[in-house]
Amino acid sequence: MKDADFLYISIPYVDGVDQEEPEIFRPLIQSVKQEIPILCVNPDRFAMEGSPPRPVVRQGSIAQMFVEQQADVYLVGKPSRIIYEAALKYFPIDISKEKILMIGDTPETDIRGAHGAGMDAALITKTGVMAYLLEKKGEAIIVHQLPL
């Protein structure tokens, strides 16, 4: 890694296995030289995987740890408005964003991104990340805000 020009955050695994706790990656993150830019193309912190579904660490959790260390992290994807604008260019018909409804299960990326792009959004609460968070309603729920 010492000769790298930038770091790309891919789906974080340990020996090919999804992890439920982001802290397992902190020692590796702390070992990365901080002067190179870091690219995160999917800022979701968790995803629901497996059967039964369980929350597993995703790129946004890793990006957040780099942000905490004052690293230069570049987010490309939700919630960045750029990704929504790019997607609109590929619609097969000309439609205004005011007529589009973004449906997602993650407030910090899906819903925040849609609102930032001037679109309406619907939060799914019966499945996905939000359903998991609501099941934990007796515990503190912390949603971290990554910079846009």
Image (cartoon, grey):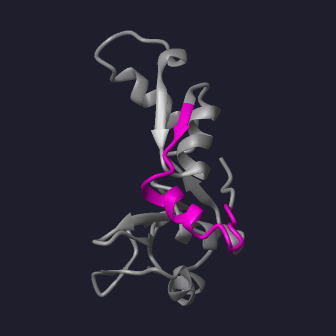
The image shows residue 120, relative to residue 109, as above or below, that is above
Is residue 60 at least partly visible in the picture? yes
Q: Quadrant of the N terminus?
A: bottom left
Between 12 and 8, the residue placed more toward the observer is 12
Task: Report x, y in % for residue 13.
Answer: 36, 79
Q: At 53% from the left edge and 56% from the top edge, which residue is drawn? A: 130
Q: At 48% from the left edge and 33% from the top edge, which residue is drawn? A: 102
Task: Report x, y in % for residue 10.
Answer: 39, 66
Task: Report x, y in % for residue 79.
Answer: 57, 44
On whether residue 136 falls in the magenta region, the answer is yes
Instruction: Describe residue 72's horizontal placement relative to residue 78 as left or right.
Output: right
The residue segment tinted magenta is: 121-143
Q: At 41% from the left edge and 81% from the top edge, which residue is drawn? A: 19
On whether residue 140 falls in the magenta region, the answer is yes
The image shows residue 108, relative to residue 3, as above or below, that is above
Task: Report x, y in % for residue 64.
Answer: 62, 67
